[in-house]
Image: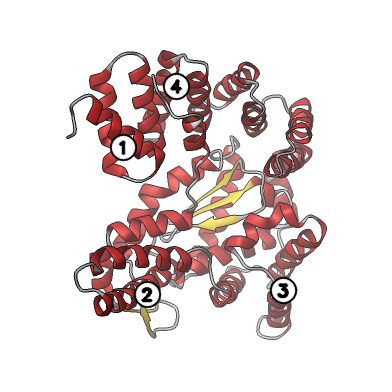
Amino acid sequence: MDVPHDLATRLHRNRLTRRDTLWLFGASTAGVALLQGCATSPVTGQSIVVGLSEAQERQIDEQQAPHQFSQDLGSVQDGGVNRYVADVGQRLHQQSHRQQMPYSYRVLNANYVNAYTFPAGAVGVTRGIMSELHDESELAALLGHELGHVNARHAAQRQGQAMVAQAVVTGLNVAVSSSQWGALAGLGSQIGASALLSSYSRDNEREADALGQEYMTRAGYPATGMTQLHQILVDQQKETPSLLETMFSSHPMSTERRDTAQRLAETRYGATKGAPAGRERFMDHTAGLRRIKPTIDACKNGETAMAKKAHGDAQAQFASALKRTPQDYAANLRMAQCLQAQGNTQEARRYADAAKTVYPQEAQARKLAGVLALGARQPERAYEDLDAFDRLLPGDPGVTFLKGVSLEGMGDKARAARQYNSYLRMTQRGDAASYSANRLKAWGYLK
């Protein structure tokens, strides 16, 4: 079987951010998005340019949020903490401008410091940031900020800007070459849309802060919770900036935002100064997470070392995490990935299998186990794990391709061809697409 060198591993590591998924969805519905045009802001009542209807915002959440949440290793296996965060979120979104949206909340096994939301209110909060908070008012500030993005329709506005950019590029290309403008416009609009959706603007962040502070005070929290949240992030940025790169790439941070929150807490929201911050309630409901904070920190340090390709240091950190919490899903999975990166496939499989046992409902360990089995030239075992992933989390293009590779290795060309054909319907770019097309041509399915 002539599989390109390391292709399976490269596909496994390929990760679409939520911003990428917004653009991909927008690209597939560009004609509809262009027709959306202007809408009335739910917050200001003024006209805003949008490229997504509310139905499309909901569809993005339904289709893409489960994949991103799985990339962040799924919801923590602590029903109590997830219910608690959902309860706080419900208190907040009942005070928001778009109460009809299908809000949902979960704490994720990811160790990095961040929180994010999809356009219709599917909110993810990492255990990395949860373990840094001190009381419920800080959690309310964090969730309120994300709700601010939903209520101001920032994702829809960013997509609207992308459509404007596309129209401008199209006009320029028509003027340059009427015979080739279609392809050039497509390329230009992709570049423009990708850049526009790479992160929230500082103005978006300021508006989300303001709305979050408004929602949290309406819900009965002290406005100082927003100031304290920003102070936590500013302090961590100074102490360990590499651990916050993901947070700041999607949420531009500055002391100016902290100072603005403080000024509003002292003026507009001064009357909330004595409101309860909910420290005891927060401590009670997050006791399990706080108990494993050393494990979370060790995983976080290991991931930072992995990013620097310091695999020995990373392995030591993951070993430390596992010594403290042997049944931690994230620590087992990250150790498997670290060992995989060092070429220790057999040992990596042991940790991947442990992760599968620890959290059988979560898909990422299945995918990693399948990749490792392919590397060990065990296509039957690979297919079993990849098919299990597909049942847990359907629609992952990389898994569709890898199932084709597995079936080809098993000698089942007919079923492999169906997987390769499915993959090409999802995308026709990159090494995997080229490989799929070449196989289909060689087998007589394509001319």
Residue drawn at x 18%, y 29% is 445
Residue indicated by mark 1: 423
The 10 Å Cα crowd at callout 3, few under 14, some 14 to 19, many 20 or more, is: many
Query: Which badge, 2 or 4, is on the more N-terminal residue?
Result: 2
Residue indicated by mark 4: 385
Q: Is residue 35 above or below residue 375?
A: below
Residue 269's disc is none
Q: CA distance from mark 1 to mark 2?
A: 29 Å
Amino acid on which the number 1 mark rests in the picture: Tyr
In the foreground, 158 or 212? 158
Amino acid on which the number 4 mark rests in the picture: Asp
Check disc 3 and report its element: helix, strand or loop: helix
Q: Is residue 19 above or below residue 262?
A: above
**Colour scheme:** secondary structure
Q: Give the foreground label among 4 and 1.
A: 1
Q: CA distance from mark 1 to mark 3?
A: 46 Å
Amino acid on which the number 2 mark rests in the picture: Ala
Q: Give the foreground label among 4 and 3.
A: 4
Q: Give the foreground label among 2 and 4.
A: 2
The 10 Å Cα crowd at callout 4, few under 14, some 14 to 19, many 20 or more, is: many
Residue 258's disc is 3
Query: Which badge, 1 or 2, is on the more N-terminal residue?
Result: 2
